[in-house]
Amino acid sequence: MLKIRCDLVEKILVTAIRDSIHKNGYKNAIIGVSGGLDSALVAALCQKALGSRHTFALLLPYRISSPASLEHGKMVCAKFKVPYEVIDISPAVDAYFDRFPAENRLQIGNKCARERMSVLYDFSVRRKALVAGTSNKSELLVGYSTQFGDSAAAFLPIGDLYKTQVFELARHLGVPEAIIAKMPSADLWPGQTDEGEFGITYKDLDIILHLMIDKRWDEGEIVERGYRLSLIRRIKKMIINSQFKRTMPPVVKLHARTVGIDFRYLRDWNK
Amino acid sequence: MIVSCLPVWYISVMKVRAIQFSPALGNIEKNMGLHVSHISRAIADGRELIVFPELSISGYHLKDIACEIALKKDGSQWREFENLSKKIDIIIGAPLEEDAGIIYNTALYFSRGKWRHTHRKVQLPNYGMFEERMIFKPGDEFRTFKIGTMTAGILICREILFPMLAYLYFIQKTDFLIGISNSPQRGIGKDGISSFQLWETMGYVFSQFYQQNYLFVNRVGFEDGIGFGGGSFFARAGQGICQKAKYVDEDVLDAEIRPADVRRARLSSNYLRDEQPQLVLRELQRILNA
């Protein structure tokens, strides 16, 4: 159901990346490479679009990040000939929590995501590059991201690909098997997996999301397909509760034309 | 010598060029430059008609830009197109403010130094990512016009997907139908992009059943992540799609339009002769008045 024609998707995404970078007066893209699948795919696509001279990766481990993540990140950069730098974010993150101790591990995870964003954006200036985001459609829809953290980017090249499609395209582009084979994880704490967090496999999540969002099936039709009503409703709730992450903050309207409401221009205005 | 005895509609061939390009959103000056450059090259290459996609002069997702950049009927841009049209016929797409505050999504035809024909888009999509009804007033007619010896008609984007609108041209004996489009690519699956198939299906229908030469000109490029798929094509009367431009990338498609192909198609299976528009009209009246 979610199969894609990879050669065509690759062509579209590579063209789109080139367009986003060049249209805004840049030549370079910068990517936070985590060692996971999404950033591996985005790095591969950016390298294809812009070449190695214009693609740069930052590997940003925290002290409790899995050592395999760093190794896989380096493996991706080697495979796709993407120059990179490793910056340990532990001193910056720990300095903050030394003053204001974390109350739970999610806080640390979010802080790490925002620290990585902060470093990426600083390097985007140093490297005269735009930040290529790595969010996929599955996580954008259920809100599985840190606001102003990993969700922050200049553009999201794989934001309309479900995770299962990310697997398919990654295979097509030759992402190393070690990265494709491992369980997807945000690596916010040891042993964390995406599917463990969701309580559902990506395969099932993506089918439900695709039927619900793209095909506009109602609950009853999805139940007939063999999915529990409680699961469908839980996913729907995740989508509704994370809508704030997918829109700009509401502006209180006072004037005739208001930013975010009826001041209506695309970002590509005049480009 | 025998050839010279044939009527003009039989022997004429028009060398047409379709421009599959990416205009800059809201940047009329830059887009004018792109138009002039493509037109000059087409003149140098001996083409006789150049066709640009829908809203070629402005880009597509105009939103609030529309009222700031819409071209005025008494504006100066036309003079440049009129001048260029002394050497080549030109069809462009433009937001046209015909009356104060009233903007149409139009296709404009320039020929022999004059602006000769305007088609105002009737079917304005207003769903999902489309919001043309918030910007444009719909047109209300489908008039043919002459390109050389040929009777021509223009459809703009979503109008192409309503076969009864092409039918209006068909019963006006159109032998050259031109569809200009800004179609966003969407609906990815294992077989490709489903939106590409829509346009090609209609191309087959217009060519086979309305027996017209049909040129489809779609843009490429991106506007805020929305990509326009290209895939412009020429479908020869009675023969289906015979030439196709690239998907996604900029491209130029040169086609030779022969009115003789229309005649040949009609002779093999004459849908125009057998069409009964009066019956269609009577039945429409009966159905609508029921």
Image (cartoon, grey):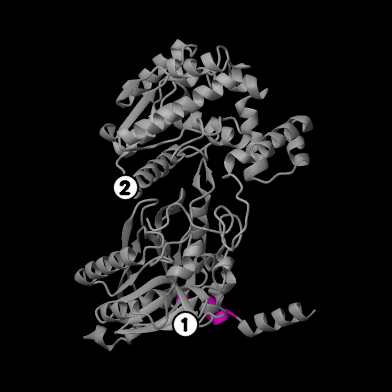
**Residue displayed at 52% across by 70% down:** B209
Q: What residue type is labelled 1?
A: Thr
Q: Residue furthest front?
A: A99
> Where is residue B66 shown, x and y percent of the image?
48, 67
Q: What residue type is labelled 2?
A: Gly
Compare residues B101 and B54 and report the one nearer the observer: B101
Question: Residue B39 vs residue A253: left or right?
Answer: left
Compare residues A263 and B166 and report the one nearer the observer: A263
Question: Residue A109 vs residue B42: left or right?
Answer: right
C-alpha span from label 2 to label 1: 43 Å
Where disc 1 sits, the SS reads: loop
Q: Give the range drawn in magenta.
A: B266-275
Q: Mark 1 lies on which chain?
A: B
Q: Can residue B17 be seen in this view?
A: yes
Question: Residue B194 vs residue B2: left or right?
Answer: right
Nearer the camera: disc 2 or disc 1 = 2
Q: Mark 2 points at which residue?
A: A25
Quarter of the figure with the C terminus of chain A: bottom left
Circle 1 packing at 10 Å, graded few (<14), some (14-19), many (20+), is: many
Compare residues A106 and A70 and report the one nearer the observer: A106
> Where is residue A142 shown, x and y percent of the image?
63, 34
In magenta segment, residue B80: no
> Where is residue B240 shown, x and y percent of the image?
44, 63
Where disc 2 sits, the SS reads: loop
Quarter of the figure with the N terminus of chain A: top right
**Residue B180, placed above or below residue A70:** below
Q: Do labels 2 and 1 share a chain?
A: no
**Residue A22, placed above or below residue B26:** above
Q: Mark 1 points at which residue?
A: B144
Q: Which chain carries label 2?
A: A
